[in-house]
């Protein structure tokens, strides 16, 4: 019985998480866990990480008041500007953290998976900076959708391997990266790009992103003298949301809203709204909500944003959902695109398509009252999406 | 008594047991039963039937492709259980089901174990359920006299090998390489022998069967003294996947003859 309790609590958030991976990887996960625990308590590691985040990534990122959006929605809206991080999104926080950890563990070969390409670019960047070899697995479909990011990774010396199995998107890129890891576990370090995967990845990745929430807290207290009424973030795997929310999790008066990608609509067959539509299941090493069919086969996800196009979600989000701590909803492709246009026109900020889903919450929400203090995590910038945006606008204009 | 236990009890020492793996529903739904017959008549000691999953993390391209084909044809757990039931009308060969945990969780572990026992399944292999997650399923299977078969890999510590030997039944699956299925024996090195010797020294309760990369009997010959048997999967599936319909039987016969000592 003792074993049962022990095995169920290690790496679990409530009922979610765990280590559902082949035996081959378990010793590597244990070594990773031990190394991470040790470095977590090591002031020198934190000093190096802080230095890199400040001088290389450009942290702290600003907390910008958004006056015209505020007026438009009748709220007091601030944006946490992760879009201003080096490489254009929050992903670099975790990539730098894990690359530094890999270096400390004496690993020289890095692998990563990527959807939109942001995590791939962030990892390629960190590897160039620290002199590490880098291979990025990317679904063939995404390679097409995000050509520019592929070029960026290659320019920084990374090898991009297109994945042609399954749906040819983030899900299959992740499976392929895990297979590579199983085969080269002795000398290679897998930098997972979200709060997914087996323990300790969901915990570690969330902690490397906590800087988002910690800075926000300090900044909002300095500017407004109080905590926000609400936090809003988009959720695919859920890394930006996890890092943003976690430092506020015990502040019961701070409401939290996670926005998933509904694709064509939550009830359609083309959606990525895992928490709204999925059921608990196991994918890529952890137990969490999962889009799956009546036989427990993983369903195809769909979203206009490659970064949210994933049928799973981080286990801690599943826990927060069941606990009722975070309110999860979903925005469609169309709603996200409309919100992106509004933000661009009113604030001069083009958010990433992923991030646009968080902005779409403003159009639909009825949970917070007028004048509330709301912080949106502007997790990435939209430069990488300009082709998609242009194409989408051309198509919809054609229909109208 | 569980057919696996019974089989190993009667197995003459020095003789290698042969487990043949096939993904359920291959080469086609119609020809699955007759292919199982062929495998039994070729001298399979144990049949391992793969339950397809959309995201098989421990498998290489061959089994991935086989999974996709099986899923396209609508193979699911219910179909597989029914197939085992049909097979049992003709054969007493032990049957082991191999599959990833999600479809089993979705079906329900207790109903799955119960059905396995009813139709005549003898063991299960769940490659994404390591020691850490085993407790949620182990007793359920063992209560139904379905052996939960553990996997040992070159990276397994001595302590883990001993724990798996204590907790698992049927046999232990020795993963010959650090990697996924579908490789070949060129991946075996001097470390492979060291690993098998380590396993032999530590395992006290279960027979040990080696798999991953075995394509013919000569691949396993050098390690004969350290094993109770071997498992062939991807190489057999490649015959089924790559041969033209009319050639399958001949190609399969030739392949199976190379698995004889």
Image (cartoon, rainbow, N blue to C red):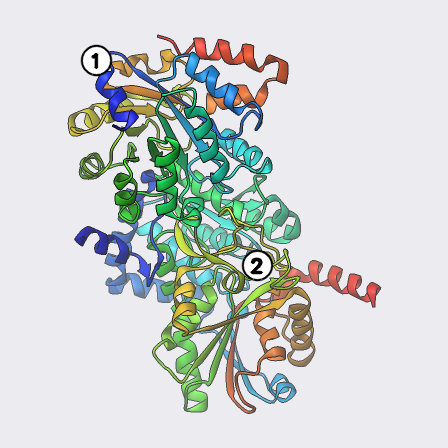
Mark 2 chain: A
Q: Is there any visible trace of residue A339 in the rendered image?
A: yes
Quadrant hosting residue A52 = bottom left
* Residue B251 % position (x, y): 54, 12
Q: Label 1 crowding class (10 Å Cα cut-off): few <14, some 14-19, many 20+? A: few
Structural crowding at the residue carrying mark 2, measured as other residues with C-alpha within 10 Å and reported as few (<14), some (14–19) or many (≥20): many
Identify which residue is drawn at 17% across, 29% down. Answer: B205
Q: Nearer the viewer, residue B36 or A274?
A: B36
Residue placed under numbered mark 1 in the picture: B13
Camera sees residue A105: no
Q: Is residue A80 left or right of residue B129?
A: right
Q: Indicate the quadrant where residue A23 lies.
A: top left
Which quarter of the figure is the C terminus of chain A placed in?
Answer: bottom right
SS at mark 2 in the image: loop
| Residue at 60 percent of width and 37 percent of height | B72
The image shows residue A207 at horizontal and vertical percentages of 36, 64
């Amino acid at each position: 019985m003792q074993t049962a309790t022990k095995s169920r609590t290690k790496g679990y958030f409530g009922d979610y998480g765990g280590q559902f991976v082949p035996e081959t990887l378990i010793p590597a996960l244990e070594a990773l866990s031990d190394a991470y625990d040790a470095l977590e308590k090591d002031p020198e590691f934190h000093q190096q990480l802080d230095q890199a985040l400040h001088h290389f990534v450009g942290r702290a990122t600003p907390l910008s008041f958004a006056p015209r959006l505020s007026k438009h929605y009748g709220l007091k809206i601030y944006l946490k500007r992760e879009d201003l991080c080096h490489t254009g999104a929050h992903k670099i926080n975790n990539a730098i953290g894990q690359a530094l950890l890999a270096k400390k563990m004496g690993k020289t070969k890095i692998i990563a998976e990527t959807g939109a390409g942001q995590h791939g670019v962030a990892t390629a960047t960190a590897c160039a900076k620290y002199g590490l070899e880098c291979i990025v697995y990317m679904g063939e479909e995404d390679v097409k959708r995000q050509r520019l990011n592929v070029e960026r990774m290659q320019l920084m010396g990374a090898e991009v391997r297109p994945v042609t199995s399954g749906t040819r998107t983030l899900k299959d890129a992740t499976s392929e990266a895990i297979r590579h890891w199983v085969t080269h576990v002795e000398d290679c370090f897998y930098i997972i790009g979200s709060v997914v995967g087996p323990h300790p990845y969901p915990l570690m990745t969330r902690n490397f992103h906590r800087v988002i929430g910690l800075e926000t807290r300090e900044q909002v207290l300095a500017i407004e003298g109080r905590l926000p009424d609400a936090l809003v973030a988009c959720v695919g795997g859920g890394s930006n949301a996890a890092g943003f929310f976690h430092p506020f999790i015990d502040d019961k008066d701070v409401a939290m809203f996670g926005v998933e990608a509904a694709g064509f609509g939550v009830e359609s067959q083309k959606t990525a709204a895992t928490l709204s539509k999925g059921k608990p299941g196991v994918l890529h090493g952890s137990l969490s909500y999962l889009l799956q069919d009546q036989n427990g086969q993983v369903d195809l996800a769909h979203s206009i944003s490659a970064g949210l196009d994933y049928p799973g979600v981080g286990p801690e989000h599943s826990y927060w959902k069941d606990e009722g701590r975070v309110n999860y909803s979903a925005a469609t492709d169309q709603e996200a695109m409309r919100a992106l246009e509004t933000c661009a026109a009113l604030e001069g900020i083009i958010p990433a398509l992923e991030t646009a889903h968080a902005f779409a919450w403003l159009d639909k929400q009825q949970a917070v009252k007028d004048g509330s203090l709301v912080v949106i995590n502007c997790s990435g910038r939209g430069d990488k999406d300009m082709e998609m945006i242009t194409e989408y606008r051309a198509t919809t204009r054609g229909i109208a | 008594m569980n057919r696996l236990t019974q089989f190993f009890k009667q197995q003459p020492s020095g003789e290698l047991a042969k487990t043949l793996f096939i993904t359920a529903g291959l080469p086609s739904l119609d020809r699955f039963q007759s292919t199982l017959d062929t495998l039994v008549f070729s001298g399979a000691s144990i049949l391992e039937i793969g339950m397809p999953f959309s995201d098989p993390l421990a498998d290489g391209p061959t089994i991935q492709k086989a999974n996709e084909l099986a899923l396209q044809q609508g193979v699911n757990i219910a179909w597989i259980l029914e197939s085992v039931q049909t097979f049992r009308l003709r054969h007493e060969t032990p049957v082991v089901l191999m599959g990833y945990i999600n479809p089993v969780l979705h079906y329900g572990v207790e109903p799955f174990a119960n059905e396995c026992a009813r139709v005549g399944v003898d063991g299960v292999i769940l490659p994404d359920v390591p020691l850490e997650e085993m407790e949620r399923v182990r007793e359920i299977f063992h209560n139904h006299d379905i052996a939960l078969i553990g996997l040992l890999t070159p990276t397994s510590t001595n302590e883990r090998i001993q724990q798996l030997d204590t907790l698992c039944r049927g046999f232990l699956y020795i993963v010959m390489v650090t990697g996924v299925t579908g490789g070949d024996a060129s991946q075996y090195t001097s470390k492979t022998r060291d690993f098998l010797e380590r396993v032999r020294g530590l395992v006290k309760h279960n027979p040990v069967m080696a798999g991953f990369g075995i394509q013919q009997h000569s691949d396993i010959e050098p390690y004969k003294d350290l094993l109770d048997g071997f498992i062939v999967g991807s190489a057999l599936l490649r015959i089924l996947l790559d041969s033209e319909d009319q050639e399958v039987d001949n190609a399969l016969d030739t392949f199976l003859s190379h698995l004889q000592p």
